Amino acid sequence: MLIKTPSDIKSSEITSKSTYLSRRKFLKTSINTGIVGSGLLLAGNTNAATLNDIRKSRYSTLEEELTDFEDITTYNNFYEFGTAKEDPVKYSGGFNPKPWSITVDGECNKPGEIGLEDLIKPHRLEERIYRLRCVEAWSMVVPWVGIPLGNVLKRFEPSSNAKYVAFTTVFRPDEMPGQRSRVLQWPYREGLRIDEAMNPLTILAVGIYGEELLNQSGAPIRLVVPWKYGYKSIKSIVKISFVEDEPRTSWNDSAPKEYGFYSNVNPNRNHPRWSQKKERRIGEFLKRDTLMFNGYADQVASMYEGMNLLKYH
Amino acid sequence: MQKLYKPLLFSVSLIPFGVLIYNGFRDNLTANPIEYITHYTGDWTLYFLLITLSITPLRNLTGKLIFTCFRRMLGLFAFFYACLHFLTYFVLDQYFDFNAIIEDIIDRPYITVGFTAFVLLIPLAVTSTKKMISRLGSNWQRLHKLIYVITTLAILHYLWLVKADTTLPITFALIFSVLMTLRLPWAKNVKKFFISEIQPSSH
């Protein structure tokens, strides 16, 4: 007899496929036409929690077609749940992101542990449509829901010694099967320079397409830094530290020549595995040119003036 | 026996290809179909290389010559999946972008070795006909020893491609080294052991 564990049941098997797809289409068009935040419209249609009171943002990338919700949530690099793209959706069912709290420490006046709700509550949720560029030369356009990281960080009153911000992902090998093998040094760590962290484009995301983040997307809270390769946007964050020295990061530890601390999207830098000149947008056939800083040069290039971006890659 | 098994093996060897086509029609090739097809055909090339290389040890261990009759066909299937793998890269992934392809071959070590392995497979496939075997004589054997180089390069290709999880390429390397070890002279003792175990001595 075959006993199916919950993680074996696709969401498409629970909701009928046509309902599911039409709902996605509806979400997609409603976002494109500006009906966001009207969560009530969707209530009862799904088990996924809908986020309310989301405002639009002038920082959104509007000229791009959104990637399908199904593609965004079934094709993931989240090694905590396995190294194959379909592993996170398959093996994240046992992960429990509630309740959640984040420890903030280091060079700041108000360190402490804070519950997720208290962290989010003082801020208004914003929709941020961003391109997401993976170092593996594929890309998506994701309608994130989140809050600017800088506004959150200011509440902890970083001191003048806070030159960098370090982030840590939760370590729960019982719930995250990928953490039981040592493909990377767990827990996953990432970092930003303080000005990068304070840049208005950088957000802490809690949702996609107006719904709470699913486990495979980094529930319940993750970083999104749209001008850097995807692995900089660390998922399921439990710790944020203000530090004076450049923090160590997981992929940089794993292969320093390939994955630098900055990891800004840069079509001019030759990478030993994937040409960074072009990328395949998920859902499209022909590759397109990769843009410097993933197309966000106007907002971020000034932070790197005078820096050799091939050296500080 | 041969006449029965050969078509059967031929059909079985086409199953992975059939499954790929089937999943293609069902739109079941993940969000990034081109990457999926690339990895899938690459995996099957390696499987067939290793299956082909297991024929000689199987023959030596069992003493059954019939296995050798399938070796060429299996090798050609390795070439078949390698062609699909290369064409996927050439047409679907790069879409005939020769500059990008040449840059890849020069700048990316995993593509350098993968491409070399593919090129080296071509003379083996070309000389796989009965005519060529008799024409080349003892040189045929020598030429076809290239399969060892090709398999080494193919495994390196995989090892250098993966970002962090080397489980599968290392597994392939282990299987390959076992198959190579079984070709060494001492393996004859293993054979004796096996034969005496399998066939009880007559009284």
Image (spheres, grey):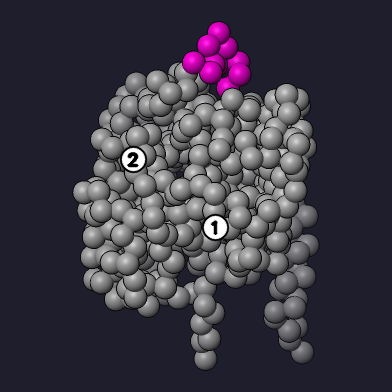
Name the element at disc 2. Answer: strand
Q: Residue at x 45, y 75 (%)?
A: A9
Could you tell me which quadrant the N terminus of chain B lies in? bottom left
Q: Which mark is residue A53?
A: none
Q: Amino acid at mark 1?
A: Ala
Instruction: Report whether residue B24 is seen.
Output: no
Marks 2/1 in contact by CB < 8 Å: the verdict is no
Residue A155 percent across, percent down from the top left: 64, 40
Which of labels 2 and 1 is toward the front?
Answer: 1
Residue A166 percent across, percent down from the top left: 69, 37
Residue A192, picture quadrant: top right
Kindly give the residue lying farthest to the top in the view shown. A306
Q: Which residues are magenta?
A: A302-313
Which sits earlier in the primary sequence, circle 2 or circle 1?
1
Q: Residues within 10 Å of mark 1 (few under 14, many from 20)?
A: many
Q: Label 2 marks which chain's residue?
A: A
Compared to A136, does B105 lie above or below? above
Residue tagged 1: A219
Instruction: Report whether residue A235 is seen.
Output: yes
Q: Nearer the viewer, residue A227 or A165?
A: A165
Question: What distance separates the C-alpha of mark 2 from that of mark 1?
Answer: 24 Å
Q: Label 1 marks which chain's residue?
A: A
Q: Are marks 2 and 1 on the same chain?
A: yes
Overall secondary structure of the magenta section = loop
Q: Nearer the viewer, residue B186 or A168?
A: A168
Q: Amino acid at mark 2?
A: Arg
Compared to A114, does B118 lie above or below? above
Residue A298 percent across, percent down from the top left: 40, 20
Residue tagged 2: A281
Task: Decide if residue B108 is on the left or right side of residue A15.
Answer: right
Residue A134 percent across, percent down from the top left: 47, 38
Q: Nearer the viewer, residue B161 or A178?
A: A178
